[in-house]
Image: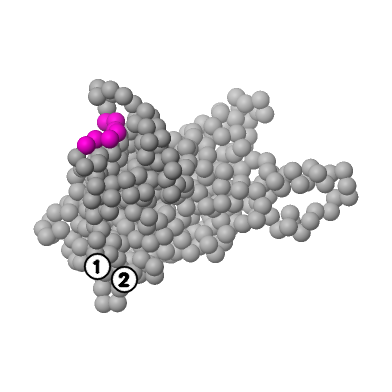
Amino acid sequence: MKIPRRSFLKQVSALSAAPFILPSHVWAADTKPNDLITIGFIGTGKQGRYLMEAFLQHKRCRVVAVCDVDTTRREDTRQRAADYYAKKSDGGAECPSYNDFREIIARKDIDAVCIATPDHWHAIPTLAALASGKDVYCEKPLTHNIHEAVSVIKAVKEHGRVLQTGSMQRSMAEFRVACELVRNGAIGEISRVECSFGPPGVPCDLPEEGMEPGLDWEMWCGPGPMRPYSSVLSPRGIHDHFPDWRNYKEYGGGMVCDWGAHHVDIAQWGLGMDESGPDAVTPPEDPNAKNGAVLHYGDKITLIHTDGYGAHFFGSEGEVKVNRGRFEFWREGKKIAGFTNREDGGSLGAAISFVEKEWLKDAKVKLYESGDHIRDFLDCVEARKRPVTNEEVGGRSAICCHLFNQAYYNHSAIKWLPKEMAFAPGSGDPKWLTRDYRSPWSV
């Protein structure tokens, strides 16, 4: 990871008046001498369309390809990109559409990919893109299981690429400030964190439906089990909701992996566990319970899956609560600052500004500040740096969610080795780390 693209261009410009002999470190640059970051999109449902619209607003990148197994979605997204560029002064740009993500991976003119497929398809195109020399923006949870998370973390390092996980709460000021308060001891010694995010995944038992032409169902199922078509899993055409494939363990991980990937990620950030994690997980007493599982960080700190306030930190001297657009800071039973809704007066920005000025002005711990998740990714692609939700962050937060799910699925206490990212000897079943991949796909 050697030289930013813009620095490369400046060096080439400086050399243009002299004989065209580039220094060896320029030839060794990881990125091409191209002023635009070219991006291919894999998965163009509701989230994929949202992400493409966001990327289009950044002039330093260009969408050059889209991929989806649904013809209508694929062509709609391709047309959106073509129409956007046609309105620009530089005219239109070709944006081919593909049914198979491997055609995007094979293109050497693409610098990065954005992956917004169902969870069971996250790891395979991510690993293929990394191996082909591409950077990756992949939606959360980063992977479908623990084995895939470990594989992605290793692959990013092996290939020297940049990866951003779509856990964009880390690019929201209320979450960063909440975690800075916790990390700087503003509420004393932390005893527990409570996170609210809904139930674990369930086995898929949806009835078969007739399917209109235009969807490659074989490819949609991919590495997951082949089953009869259901519009619950893949609604046809353009839809404006998040499909419920995420509720089924074969293709997602329930709300534990959906919203859990957001709030558990913030808990990890506040606890300073981005490169570590829990050392045990225990299930609730009731085997049918949908919450109540606990991650253990040593003997002193627990992370409890409950119904509540997003991420809620409890300390010996106070509490910090945070959710999107809401934030509260309490000390010794007194509310120091906060914002929950407009009816209560004030604003979220004012509450955050007060805390930063009065409580974090001389803070020893300053967390990564990103005001825009996609801009942060593009900045890091150019600078060859690790973004706010890099592979270690996204992978380990996903592992926490998967540990929660395994406690629910198997109603078993599990001891975990966070450094090794493996079950402790005599604990857990190796099968729980992975899944049965349907040929020809595997990780």
Mark 1 sits on what residue? 414
Which element is circle 1 on?
Answer: strand
In the rendered image of this protein, does residue 224 appear above or below residue 328? below
The foreground one among 69 and 61 is 61
What number of labels is visible? Answer: 2
Q: CA distance from mark 1 to mark 2?
A: 7 Å
Q: Is the N terminus in the top left, top right, bottom left or bottom right quadrant?
A: bottom right
Q: Which mark is residue 423?
A: 2
Residue 83 placement: quadrant: top right
Q: Position of residue 437 (x, y in %)?
A: 37, 64
The residue depicted at 53 percent of the width and 48 percent of the height is 113
Q: Amino acid at mark 1?
A: Ile
Residue 397 in the magenta stretch? The answer is no
Residue at coordinates 39% horizontally, 70% vertically from top-left? 420
Q: Which residues are magenta?
A: 334-340
Q: Quadrant of residue 273?
A: bottom left
Q: Which numbered disc, 1 or 2, marks the residue that appears first in the sequence?
A: 1
Towards the viewer: 400 or 326:
326
Bin the neighbour count of mark 1 within 10 Å (Cα to Cα): few under 14, some 14-19, many 20 and up.
Answer: many
Amino acid type of the residue tagged 2 in the rendering: Phe
Between 369 and 428, the one lying in front of the other is 369
**Which sits in the foreground, 265 or 72?**
265
Residue 175: give x, y in percent of width and height: 36, 41
Residue drawn at x 60%, y 43% as measured from the top left: 38
